[in-house]
Image (tube, grey):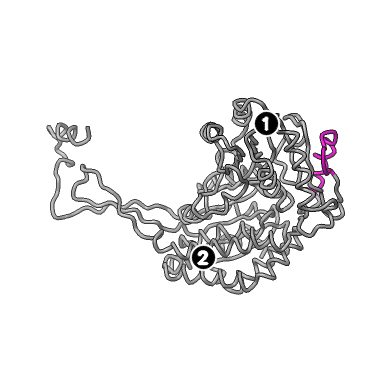
Amino acid sequence: MLVNKENISVMLREHKEYFEQGQPFDITFRLKQLKKLHQVIGENEKLIMDALYKDLGKCEFEAYASEVGYSLDSIRNVIKNLKSWAKVKKVPTPIHQFGAKSYIYPEPYGTVLIVGPYNYPFQLVIEPLVGAMAAGNCAILKPSESTPNVTNAIKKIISENFDEKYIRVVEGEKEETSALINAPFDYIFFTGSVAVGKIVMQAAGKNLVPVTLELGGKSPCIVDKTTKIDIAVKRILWGKFMNAGQTCVAPDYVVVHKDIKDKFINKMIDTIINFYGEDPINNTDYGRIINQRHMERLVQIIEKDKNKIIHGGTFSKDDFFISPTFLDNIDWKDASMQEEIFGPILPIMEYTDLNQVIKMINQRPKPLALYLFSEDKNVEQEVLTKVSSGGGCVNDTISHISSPHLPFGGVGHSGIGSYHGKASFDTFSHKKSVLKKTTLFNIDVAFPPYKNKIKVLRKILK
């Protein structure tokens, strides 16, 4: 359904009434609903996969690995661990509260708004939804308007299997999204660009609504001279050109040591041809750009930096196709380095001094991901301790986001908050602190008249 200020208020009231009935708070109910979600995703696999192909040209393997299968595995992990995560936790009590016990109660926020992006339009709606359900919340989902087929698939799955007062899918574009983010939800979870993330945070701030922002940025990939080039190239190109480069944690640019640069580039060209052939427009494993606006944006980068192209650079606007493109001898004045690329264009820089690379990265907004390829433990230690990022990998790309044991999120301009696995449960749970005090006795030092009680207090708190 399309939304406006009036019917958002109605939805929130309905969700509040449903929440207050207590069902979402019940662990048995949560597990039942998560199992149902797992079941219906499996039953609708073909519908989802077809939608992903229509919207993004995603091949079957990528669609299952990064969207459908990823979501199923995530739900299974949450179901396995939810009872443990949801337990009330007893924690130590300080001596000055003698006669008391302290507990942390994880409780749901209420109704959460989840705004999804276009690049992984199924998984990046379902993954936060799983966390919201696990924590006991109601949810309103706003999938991307740029992926109408996936949105219809999500709407069908949710509307046919869940009470709309519990989980509801809404549609719309900028105006509807603006109305949603300005409404008094109990929590907002947004995945998208830095620019829109700022708008979401400003809107949420007016209602003091807590937010998680999963954004992006220019994620660097450092290739040290000790790198095993054949392995590094495969892993970098896989991470970069999956989903035609439309991945928030894709390597945005490569900084390679001068001593191995030529060999590295030659291997890159050989490998990308091996991946997708001489004519990737005809390769069904290679995806498409989401829409005309982003095609134009990426084509402008190619045309402005065309003298730096060493491989690729071809495109077809009618087919939403841009070939895997490598740019060499890039600097920060070039078009490809002005913002996150979010497409199949890979700029290459060279370096000789690692400290200069670290300084260069640290002079810019903190990236969502940092990748290092090296066999030198000293180099690894230097980079990991001196460069801040949301997360990252050593000798791989992207794979860190697939572990339910690793929180995923940004830092600074690349985002606020994290999720995946237990981190998802924690994100959508308020940690309520409760101190329970005995009534078997009373310690009168805390009560007036104080007289010389300060001496006792100093001994306890010193």
Residue at the spot of label 2: 76
Element under disc 2: helix
**x, y percentage for residue 97?**
22, 45
- Magenta segment: does it hold 207? no
Q: How far apart are marks 1 and 2 (CA)?
A: 42 Å
Q: Label 2 sits on what residue type?
A: Arg
Q: Which of 193 and 234 is in front in this view?
A: 234
**x, y percentage for residue 13?**
52, 63
**x, y percentage for residue 212?**
54, 48
Which portion, as a residue range, is magenta? 293-313
Residue at the spot of label 1: 257
Identify which residue is drawn at 57% across, 43% down.
392
Quick check: 152 left or right of 97?
Answer: right
Where 91 falls versus 310 (above or below)?
A: below
Element under disc 1: strand
Q: In which quarter of the image is the C terminus?
A: top left
Label 2 CA crowd tier, 10 Å (few <14, some 14–19, many 20+): few
Where 372 falls versus 359 (above or below)?
A: below
